[in-house]
Amino acid sequence: MTELLLRDGAVHTFDDDRSVVESILFRDGRVAAAGDTEPVEAAATDPQTVDLDGRVVLPGFNDAHTHLLSVGIDQLETDLADTDDRAEALSMLGENAATTEPGDWVLGYNFDETTWPDEDGHLTRTDLDAVSEDHPVAAMRVDGHAAAVNSLALDRVDLDGVERDVNRNDDGTPTGVLVEDAAGRVKQATYPRGDKARRALAAATERAHELGVTSVQNMSGLTAPQEFGSPIHAAFFGAWRDDELGLRVTFYLHSGKAESLSNLEIASGFGDDWLRIGGLKTFSDGSLGARTGKISGTYVDDPDNDGTMVTTESELRELFRTAARADQQIATHALGDVAVDTVLDCYEAVLDDYRVPDPRLRIEHLELATDAAIARMADLGIVASMQPNFLQWAGEDGIYETVLGSEARGGNNRFRSVRDADVPLAFGSDTMPIGPLHGIHHSVNAPHDTQRLSVDEAIAAYTRDAAYAEFTEDEKGTLESGKLGDAVVLDANPFAEPESIADIDIDITVIDGKIAYESST
């Protein structure tokens, strides 16, 4: 029998009554008791004991939309997220090239040119040719829908059939900027496999523990890494078999696996407390940063462009019918208002095909949903899976204003509007970045009323409501007796100082009733 006692703190159970108790006891991976210190201590036999000294305890964070191996890849390759300008990004890629065997890929991730000086702009083939002519070089934009590559990479990657997504100069030569399917070919060519995938998963798990993440809902990307099988799933299953998974994972399979999954009649929830199938992940449109989100009107900095439906309406309907045949949940990427409306039309058309009364179909991102779309979601029982950290681009001169105009400032990521319409709301990171407290900070301190949530609402979206989004609300998301023993201990109180949530650190992460991470400070 294994016991862990957290005593004399403020344990926010996040039950329906929002009970706050002094102490909590975990036994054999479950919550055994929660309440006043004396009776909880009396319920213990021989526990490992942590004195909280008044610190706040929350249920473990559940990232409802992430790409876990991407987090690990950032640790293994070059993470460009915090670069201040083009020169710094290129310098970091050059350092990578200097320690990489000639002919092997040099990879960078998460660059965001909107945070650089205006004159810098997007990375190009010319920039990356200067990094190396002996290595294929690729840098992925933070949204994952655009990439920059050098000349050797252009020669290395098969772009047949996706030429429309290859950006070209007036003379027809490729600029090195690739979007959507073409960017997907780069990801497909460079995705880690085998031992490297396992190392990326281990690195991602360690990082998740540091940030208080105990569960993730892993979303397949637009492009399947390989035609048969998946290195992502192979890494998950390998770690699960070896008892080394370390996080509770629900994974949503690539739409290309729809027929195979339904033919096996595997419904959502197949698996155990550590590794489960969530259902099908599909895409409707692209991203705002790549100017491929499908919107009404056009982009202010590209007035002939209204975005891209990367999957046609007829293709979506067929995918949804296939998923409904086996009662699989569907999670569909849709951020532009036109894309959201299209997905809702397709969802409504297949709801009666489900044998289960509550399939909890999901829309991922939902950045530009209209009032009418939000009302339809409430009527249809559709889950809103949204990313509060996207508000980092919602201020003056941010990407929303750059591509949509100043009127977009309060019209994107309207978490308040979604909550007020009684649409189930789950929060995830999309790995931009992965830390839940970063996203919670942005939603609590959002610049506009339509976006702003209370501290309780924001934390709930990352715990109990995220569990609802994956059908696990009976097992996790709260610290009630019998629930899974996943929790985080914070070094400060977010309810007392909401304006300072961004400065809060994780002191302890508990998974399965055991300490998985403890801060050294």
Image: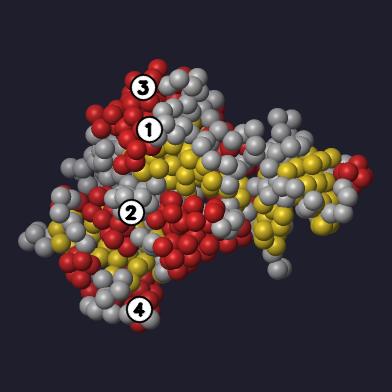
Q: Nearer the viewer, residue 357 or 414?
A: 357
Front: mark 1 or 2: 1
Compared with 349, 431 (above or below) is below
Question: Is disc 2 surrounded by few (<14), some (14 to 19) or many (20+) residues within 10 Å?
Answer: many
Q: Earlier in the sequence, mark 4 or mark 2?
A: 4
Q: Which residue in the structure is indicated by mark 2? A: 225
Q: Which residue in the structure is indicated by mark 1? A: 262
Q: Earlier in the sequence, mark 1 or mark 3?
A: 1
Alpha carbon separation for disc pair 3 and 2 = 28 Å
Q: How is the image coloured?
A: secondary structure
Q: Residue at x 33, y 71 (%)?
A: 106
> Hey, what amino acid is under mark 2?
Pro
Q: Earlier in the sequence, mark 3 or mark 4?
A: 4
Alpha carbon separation for disc pair 1 and 3 = 15 Å
Say if mark 4 contacts mark 1, CB within 8 Å.
no
Q: Earlier in the sequence, mark 4 or mark 1?
A: 4
> Hey, what amino acid is under mark 4?
Thr
Q: Which residue in the structure is indicated by mark 3? A: 350
Residue 459 image position (x, y, % from top left): 62, 42
Residue that sits furthest to the bottom in the current view:
98
SS class, disc 3: helix
SS class, disc 2: loop
> Hey, what amino acid is under mark 1?
Ser
Front: mark 1 or 3: 1
SS class, disc 4: loop
Q: Residue at x 38, y 76 (%)?
A: 96
Q: Is residue 106 left or right of residue 444?
A: left
Numbered tag placed on residue 426 in the rendering? none
Residue 477 image position (x, y, % from top left): 64, 39
Question: Is disc 4 surrounded by few (<14), some (14 to 19) or many (20+) residues within 10 Å?
Answer: some
Q: Which residue in the structure is indicated by mark 4? A: 100
Q: Nearer the viewer, residue 382 or 317?
A: 317
